Image: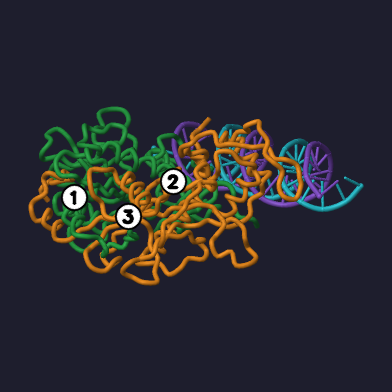
Chain colours: A green, B orange, C cyan, D purple
Amino acid sequence: MPAAGSDPSSSDGSQASDNATGLRVEVLSVVFQVRTPPSADGCDVHAALCVLLSRTATEPGRWSLPGGDVAGDETLSVVARRLVADTMDVRDIAHLEQLSVFSDPARVPGVRTIASTYMGLVRSDSPVTLPEGAAWFAVDALPPVAFDHAEIIDTARHRLAAKLSYTNIAFALAPKQFPMSELSEIYCAALGYPVDTTNLLRILSRRAVVVSTGTVGKTGRSGGRPPALYAFADNELRVTDEFATLRPPM
Amino acid sequence: MPAAGSDPSSSDGSQASDNATGLRVEVLSVVFQVRTPPSADGCDVHAALCVLLSRTATEPGRWSLPGGDVAGDETLSVVARRLVADTMDVRDIAHLEQLSVFSDPARVPGVRTIASTYMGLVRSDSPVTLPEGAAWFAVDALPPVAFDHAEIIDTARHRLAAKLSYTNIAFALAPKQFPMSELSEIYCAALGYPVDTTNLLRILSRRAVVVSTGTVGKTGRSGGRPPALYAFADNELRVTDEFATLRPPM
DNA sequence: TCAAAAGTGTTCGTAGTACACCCATGT
DNA sequence: ACATGGGTGTACTACGAACACTTTTGA
């Protein structure tokens, strides 16, 4: 009733102590890379969308997302980057963006913990070497994961799929230069269904998302015409199809 | 390096004390309603997208978003609803969803405060009576606002505009029943540009977002044919145009 | 019967899909 | 020369924007 409003400096002591008695804020990151999944036992050796996970110390047999508690005077996106670099040795995240906050009081046992989550993308040609206890998993073949991390990964998958269709977000999944067929495979892996390479080029060209570099690549293992190499016009997120409908007049 | 991962129970004491020494989590809500703005001084007495603000205690002359610190074992969306109800007497938020987390260490002076923000929508026919020190402001005519609240409001505006074009989110802005012309005004107010009523009906009908109720309304002040009344098919958020492009085959 | 507002129908442009056909290279 | 993969061109479809025209009411 008193118009305390949102002014944080007007809060009284009882709330501050509430914090001190057990509110924890953790940052979790869903790091994606399109790569050949680890368990290439036989046939399907194609590229797949993979997530970065590490063995959980306290819950044997379960895997969890990289992250940790908030500390220091850093923006949370900086915290997310630092934690992934420290625990996973992954330092070249090409794009990082916020996902939801997960705040269910029962999401983890013990101290009430709120998770602020992020999605990070690593280019497919980025040479990552993981430390012990860390691994990539195809999103379609996840191991048992801790707490609500499966739900968080699912949120990230859907976010990525949605943004592929109306932004240039794939710049952070593809190498700096690439033949269109490779980009098509990346889209296919991230979306989960095939994409026509021909039309992909047309769409991305019209929107000026992708430009030709003029150079050509090497022809593949079994002959064929050498491909033209393309590159993304921007290296940061851009919305390329803002209004699906209800566009402003003119 | 040690695979602490994201397991919160594996964190050590230093981080917990870090929390205790001054990490605060606040929840802020951007509550929108399409209504006639307060300062109807003359001509433009049309409906506008308005935001709910209250006078700030510590920063005289500035207005701020409703909110407060996190306390108790509640999900943050419940906290947001409770805080708006307690401080603004607004209890019928038809839709509430998360916006971003704002975590710049310098966003408010004093104790480091992370803001988890929400957007709430109130139906245009909802009869709200605000307490002293609270008021609606047209988003195009905001008063001086505290801290980074202007940025938060801007984020909410853009989120709302985007979702109007690919979801049924307008169900939470419109009355339960309405003539199409009224819905058109609501879209116009929220988007900031005129919307063709004819085409709006066609689009929303095809997507089965809006259905005819069979009933007709009263004709307006200056004659005219009485309008058919429509209603939204759902009362919760639904994505109606998932893939702007790159649809799955078939 | 005239103005005002609602509803219907028509035309047009454009983006995206599907697919056939042509080109360049290695073996 | 032929298989293999890359690139170009051409319908076809569908959705949405714009706008003219008809219908129904109150004054």
Going 39% across and 69% down the picture, which residue do you hit? B62
Q: SS for tag 3?
A: strand
Residue B89 relative to residue B163: left or right: left
* Residue that lies at the very extreme toward the bottom in this rendered image: B60
Residue D7 position within the rendered picture, expressed as x and y whole percent measured from the top left: 53, 47
Neighbor class of circle 2 (other Cα within 10 Å; few <14, some 14-19, many 20+) is many
Instruction: Report the front residue among B203 and B21.
Output: B21
What residue did someone put label 3 on? B101
Q: Between label 2 and label 3, give the one nearer the viewer.
A: 3
Neighbor class of circle 1 (other Cα within 10 Å; few <14, some 14-19, many 20+) is many
Asked if badge 1 and badge 2 are on a common chain, one would say yes
What residue did someone put label 1 on? A24
Q: Are marks 1 and 2 in contact (CB under 8 Å)?
A: no
Chain of the residue where label 1 is placed in the rendered structure = A
* Residue that lies at the very extreme toward the left in this rendered image: B13
Q: SS for tag 1?
A: strand
Residue D16 position within the rendered picture, expressed as x and y whole percent measured from the top left: 62, 45
Residue D3 position within the rendered picture, expressed as x and y whole percent measured from the top left: 46, 31
Instruction: Report the front residue among B100 and A9.
Output: A9
Asked if badge 3 and badge 1 are on a common chain, one would say no
Q: Earlier in the sequence, mark 1 or mark 2?
A: 1
Image vertical order of residue A70 relative to residue A62, above or below = below
